[in-house]
Image: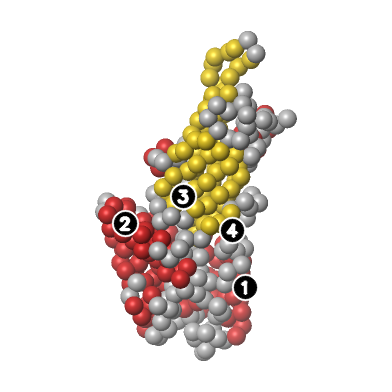
Amino acid sequence: MKRPLMELLTTVISAGVVGLASAADVYQMKVPTDVANKTKQAQQLRLSNKPEEARKILEPIAKQNHSYFLVHYNLGLAYAAQSDWSSAIKELEYAKQIDVDEKLSEPTIYNTLGWSYLQAGAYDRALGEFTLAQQPETFKKLNPQAQRKVLINTGLTYAYLGQPEKAMDFYAKANATTPPQRNLQQPVGQPTGTAAQPGPSPKGVYELKATAQATGRKLPEGPEYRFAILLSAPQSTLAGIKSVRYKFDDPTFPQPLKVADNPATQFSVSYTGWGCLDDVGVELELLDGTQYSLVFDMCKSLGPEWSD
């Protein structure tokens, strides 16, 4: 057992779908090569967690190329990466109209736009886009992982609309695709899985936080502390989680396993003790059955005053 240091452990879980392998050479052959190359450059910046740099490249290109699908799509995603949902929706709606007008049949736009509406709290609009993504001609163009994400997002939207039975139905459909087991032990701030992918991938972010408070009660050996660990994330992310299991692997813990299943409390657990652990095992299970695991350095999260 150690006494810890402040740092947020962030793991990024893709909430979108992936489909664009390249720019103008796939969907719009008429787009000038230099414009397509700049758009690809901005796309890579966005996927490298540099949405502001991507936005600065894409905005002037979008103004000069009103009918270029990929530039508006990526600009929408850059706004989404900055949680500017109104701007994201505007650009993605524009991209969607280009897709329809030019009969591009790009299949991921509906899920991406739906996710932006979901984040903005426009659940009916989100459901409409996810429904379009499930139209047979569109749905069959998505790979199995992308199809599964559409189903998960549809279930999540029904949950927000107060229709839990329909939500569980879509979670079951998604779960039927055999959810992958993932180990998300990842350096701080680094996205997992999506950073190297070429296509759109708006994200939801999980943050684990540990907090410590003195109880105000002293024992002969010294003061005790009240510790808590909670999951800090957007409500749309928390709503998709079924439970979180925390493993305190230390002989001094009378209850080494604690389970939280209440999103209203941000899946928090707490204990009274003398110190913290730098290797708390955390296992997340989503409503669709997907499971994630990571090791959380609680001591680092608490700040320098808890370091050795």
Return the x and y of residue 296 as percentages of the image width and height.
60, 42
Q: Nearer the viewer, residue 35 or 238?
A: 238
Note whether residue 262 is visible.
Answer: yes
Residue type marked 1? Gln
Residue located beneath label 2 in the image:
167
Looking at marks 2 and 1 on the same chain, the residue that comes earlier in the sequence is marked by 1
Where residue 144 sits: x, y (%)?
Answer: 46, 71
Measure how far apart labels 1 and 4 are at the Cα level.
Answer: 21 Å
- Badge 1 density bin: few <14, some 14–19, many ≥20, Cα 10 Å: some
Numbered badge on residue 41: 1
Determine the residue positioned at 61% across, 35% down.
249
Is 147 displayed left or right of 169 in the figure? right
Residue 9 vertical placement versus 40 (above, below): above
Task: Check the image and tell me how it is coloured.
Answer: secondary structure
Mark-to-mark CA distance, 3 and 4: 17 Å
CA–CA distance in space, label 2 to label 1:
38 Å
Question: Horizontal and vertical percent for residue 184?
Answer: 59, 53
Can you tell which of label 2 and label 1 is closer to the viewer?
A: 2
Q: Which residue is mark 4?
A: 192
Disc number lying in front (2 or 3): 3
Q: Secondary structure at mark 3?
A: strand
* Mark in the foreground, 4 or 2: 2
Mark 4–mark 2 distance (CA, rounded to whole Å): 26 Å
Residue 79 in sight from this viewpoint? no
Say which residue appears at 58% left-offset and 54% top-offset: 183
Side of 135 relative to 203 (left or right): left
